[in-house]
Image (cartoon, rainbow, N blue to C red):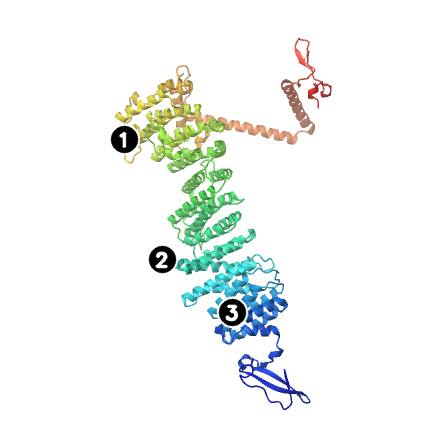
Amino acid sequence: MKISSRDGKPCQKEGKEPGWSQGLFERPFEVGVGLSVTCRFKLVSREAGVCGCCGALRPRYKRLVDNIFPEDPEDGLVKANMEKLTFYALSAPEKLDRIGAYLSERLSRDVARHRYGYVCIAMEALDQLLMACHCQSINLFVESFLKMVRKLLESDKPSLQILGTNSFVKFANIEEDTASYHRSYDFFVSRFSEMCHSGYEDPDIRTKIRMAGIKGLQGVVRKTVNDELQANIWDPQHMDKIVPSLLFNLQSSERTESRSPSPLQASDKEKESPVELTERCFRELLGRAAYGNIKNAVTPVLMHLDNHSLWQGKTFAVRCFKIIMYSIQSQHSHLVIQQLLGHLDANSKNSATIRAGIVEVLLEAAAIAASGSVGPTVLEVFNTLLRQLRLSVDYELTGSYDGSTNIGTKIIKAHEERQLQEAVIRTIGSFANTLPTYQRSEVMLFIMGKIPVPGVHPLLPSSGSGPEGTRMIQVMLLKSLVQVTAGYQTTNMLTALPSSFLEPLLSFSLTEDSEVRLLVLQILLSLIDRHDNRPKFSNISIITDISVLKLKVDKCSRQDNLFMKKHGQQLYRHIYLGCKEQSSGRQHYESLFALLALLSVELANEEVVVDLIRLALALQDLALSTDEGLPVYNRCAVHALAAAYLNLICQLTTVPAFCQHIHEVIEVRQKESPYLLPEDIFIDLPRLPTSLDKLESNMLFLQSKITEVLGGSGYNTERLATPYVPQYTDEDRLSKRKSIGETISLQVEVESRNSPEKEERSPAEEITFETLKNAIVDSVGMEEQERERRRQVVEKFQKAPFEEIAAHCGARATLLQSKLNQIFEITIRPPPSPSGTISSGYGQSQTRSVPIYEMKFPDLCVY
């Protein structure tokens, strides 16, 4: 204010008075007699919407804010005045909300007038105030800040959108001391997601906008994920926008990678490429996901892959789930796998390529998952995969998806279904490799229970595929077992091959299907091989020195001995019967040789060695026999198999005379009949003789000679001299052999012919069709009698008086008690007493039972 006389001259002299500039003027006002007040005014253009203001009466915070803006926006922020404004805000934090509101007002005005230089200055000032001020009043200031950011994001100018995004990202990195109850980020999620899908014409600007959107989403996640008072960012309404936006940029950048510059041309901008930024943001989002949020984060991924048909290519889908599996916490991996399995079920009637893509993703996810991460529902995982395997077999054979009018019209391609089946089998193996030993045993039993066994599970689910479908399901499930048992390591064979698993498995070795029998042999080899010796027996050959094989041999444990006592004869019998199959080929004989060799190395004791030698000699007799009707190739192959195994076992036993006999026979065969050795028979085009009727004794391994030489080394000669005869059981009825009666008759004849007590034994009973029929009728009669007896017992307890039933039960109880008393009198003796013994009437000493409280103990025993 300036006070002057009434006749005072105006003191406005443009540019003369210090501190005044153009647009400033003075005007006197009369306030009393002889007194006047001169006020200074600043002219403002009409476009500002304000005609003028009194600078001296304006609040200080407004003056401080105005002073940070230069006359020319190109000069940038006035730093000295900005420091004053910052100091004022720190000194009077209650003014922060007003400062923010005023800055917001100025920014809105500048945006409307397209003064983008002042807009940048205002945002820079806001950023500095945000970084400098951390107090309880920051919340009100933030509201003004977010209002300005929103104003910029709503603009059509890409530069303003990027400017607002950068400010928001800086704000997101600030940790606030106090929580906000009323702040909402819904607009920012929607706007940033929209920016991620920008379709701006200029590719460089489009890339900048999309990257700004990705950074904005990353800022929203950082700001809200750990704030319980904010709207839950994991809600589907938010995840359905965030995740597809990230995947869109991940996918679009993947398409442009092929056109990316060479490594020599790559610059620092490569570090800020959209793909890397998107992947980093996606990983951060998943890394912050808790147990209950995994589903909401993964579901949009599945929907995006469905909507854009990205399962067929497999590459992008696999990449997405690799990012997911590596980013989430390891203990949550099973949740992702369960969602994939559920999605696979939901797409069970889609094309095979889509299902194969999901299965391939499952395969990769299982390989990444840590041990045991399949979760608590292990069997449910394998049940889902086996169900898909069965459905694929049905689709391939029937040619339709359950005959539906809408979906059944699709053309089912058999080769695509086979690719899906192979993918499912590989995935089953991948899952099994992540499991501990005990869970893998459960999975083996579970899969075995799903395999249709002829005669045991004749009724399968109604698939309409018929016997061929049953066979294909058997093959597929056995292939799954091959994958599960691959690399299986166990120390106890009784747990690895329990009866509930071994018996149904061996029943498949009796079928006529050569593929099924080969799969059974592969499963047995995987389970028995515990020291990785199997590759050393992959080919059948005569090895002069087995030390070159570097076999790993451990002493046979007690559990191994129990296993061979329990199941050894079963294994021998199935090896013998496998050699009798006319459809057996080179792979079958190689697998049978490997099985014999692994039994000798892994599970052999002295008794097992004797039985295996007897089995090899029985195989030689089988090849000599013409009653089986084996082709010449099969007979030569069995001869070669027996020779190769005897050559191996003689070197394992280290009995010189035994080795000499085996080597002599092999040398004779090499000179006179090489077709009886593996090197000449297990080749692509073997030279076969016309017949094997005339074989000299020097070409054969003699049981008497082997018994003699091994008997001198302490082996059981009586057992060695007894020819091996397979024991036939009820299991043989599960095979698809045309006549089991003929096989049983052969057993009786062979047993009677080869018995050393042939002269003393009575003639073998001839088993004919009538004998078998009578045996079946007798067994049916016994079952009828047992059923009648049970019916009478039930009827008695239903109709007899209570007194009669009580007397009957009481008599049985009395009889039982008397028997128990007799047993106790015989087995139980009174404890020895310090009081000594007394003599009975017959001169025998009898222990006298003395109560514990009457016993006299030595002083050293008393506490």
Residue at horizontal 53%, vertical 67%? 149
Q: How far apart are the alpha carbons under marks 2 and 1? A: 65 Å
Query: In the rendered structure, which amino acid carries the disc numbered 2?
Result: Leu
Which residue is under mark 2? 264
Res 1 → quadrant = bottom right
- Tell me the crowding category of disc 2: few under 14, some 14 to 19, or many 20 or more residues within 10 angstroms, Cα based: few
Res 132 → quadrant = bottom right
Query: In the rendered structure, which amino acid carries the disc numbered 1?
Result: Leu
Residue 595 in the image: above or below residue 825? below
Query: In the rendered structure, which amino acid carries the disc numbered 3?
Result: Leu
Residue 510 in the image, given as x and y percentages of width and height: 41, 33
Q: Mark 3 touching mark 1, by CB under 8 A?
A: no
Q: Nearer the viewer, mark 3 or mark 1?
A: 3
Residue 112 in the image: above or below residue 425? below
* Left or right placement of residue 822 versus residue 185 in this view: right
Res 102 → quadrant = bottom right
Q: Secondary structure at mark 1?
A: loop
Q: How far apart are the alpha carbons under marks 3 and 2? A: 38 Å
Label placed on residue 152: 3
Which residue is under mark 1? 688
Q: How far apart are the alpha carbons under marks 3 and 1? A: 90 Å
* Left or right placement of residue 615 versus residue 82 in this view: left
Q: Quadrant of the C terminus?
A: top right
Closer to us: 606 or 76? 76
Compare marks 3 and 2 and give the one earlier in the sequence: 3
* Left or right placement of residue 128 versus residue 535 in this view: right
